[in-house]
Amino acid sequence: MELFRKILAHPNRTLIIASPFGGYKVVVNNNEDVNSPEHVIGLKGITETLHAMFWPNYVTPAINTYSCARKSKYKRLAAHGKSSSHRNTPRRVNNQRMGQEIGRRVHGELNTYISIMQFHEHGIISDENAGVRMKAFAAAIGKNGIGGAVHPCTYAIIEKMLKCWKLIPLAAEWCAGDLHGEFKHATQIDLIVIRHGDFENSTRGKLILCEVKTGYNHGKFRTGNDLMRHVQPAMKNSPLHQAMIQLVMGADMFCSTYNISLDTIDLAIIHCPSKPTHVYSSEFVAANDDSPRIEPSVEYIVPHVRDSIRRALFAQRLL
């Protein structure tokens, strides 16, 4: 926690701004004169650069899906040996696009949740008050007009973090990047969390930087169609490994931006699969016992994988 408070108070915290139209900017003064005009340095996100350099041949798998009503009718026709029209047959859905659409919503909801809960000030809220806070969070989501309900992936990630993984979320969508304009890249750390035990002992423990991914159902998150370029030992170009490379580069930027050591942080990938046929309830998903169970997973990046990715990034002059 002492480390996170240092980051909160760091002067670079407000320098990098994410643009709603894509990309980032750094606003700096040319000299110490407070009346001098601000100088804006444009930065671009890292994903496009990493994609072109490390996994240019990756092909996003499509999946077969259909609505519940269409699925039932399709099975019924098949059982009677009847052919079905194009309206009853499964349709192909782009796994990546589905994940991006859900991901934007889930990232926004996690950011709202952490802003409301303020764990870095109050610690873990008691179980007696957790339900009240979550309902207040759901109400805030409804007022913001994001579908009127908390997405099941958002709730599943929150539940797993607090109850199973024993992680306390401190911040979301935290900007980091190159403040000197040499590489002209920036990114956002999806989540910054800390382990329960490390929260209580403010002088020890590491921050955990997390990359959150949604979609890629049916095992597609770990499936690649080629090898990553420039990375040794070889690894597949799966969405999991893509997320690892993104996070390792983002972590280096984070440490550079806030002048902290890489030894003070751990890295983790949180993946939450989501069914494309899920029908969102108009009520808070936690209160709906019939809601489908979504099981997010967390995977920490082990040191030797982290080091091999950093070597590849250095070789390509990205760090």
Image (cartoon, helix red, strand yellow):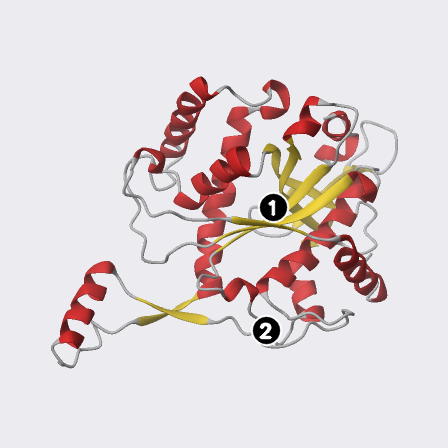
Please report the residue visible at 79 percent of the width from the left and 42 percent of the height from the top: 255
Q: Is residue 167 visible?
A: yes
| Residue that carries the numbered disc 2 in the rendered image | 58
Quadrant holding the C terminus:
bottom right
Q: Give the distance between the C-alpha atoms of the residues marked 2 and 1, in whole angstroms.
A: 27 Å
| Residue that carries the numbered disc 1 in the rendered image | 19
The spot of residue 273 in percent (x, y) is 46, 55
Indicate whether 194 appears above or below 84.
Answer: above
Quadrant holding the N terminus:
top right
Disc 1 residue type (three-letter): Ser
Q: Is residue 43 visible?
A: no
The spot of residue 299 in percent (x, y) is 62, 51
The spot of residue 129 in percent (x, y) is 44, 18
The spot of residue 56 in percent (x, y) is 64, 74
Please report the residue visible at 32 percent of the width from the left and 53 percent of the height from the top: 278
Residue nearest the observer in this picture, 126 or 210? 126
Which mark, residue 44?
none
Do the residues under discs 2 and 1 have CB atoms within 8 angstroms? no
Judge depth for marks 2 and 1 and give the one in front.
2
Please report the residue visible at 63 percent of the width from the left and 45 percent of the height from the top: 210
Q: Is residue 172 left or right of residue 163?
A: right
Q: Is residue 156 left or right of residue 38?
A: left
Q: Quadrant of residue 4?
A: top right
Secondary structure at badge 1 equals: loop
Disc 2 residue type (three-letter): Tyr
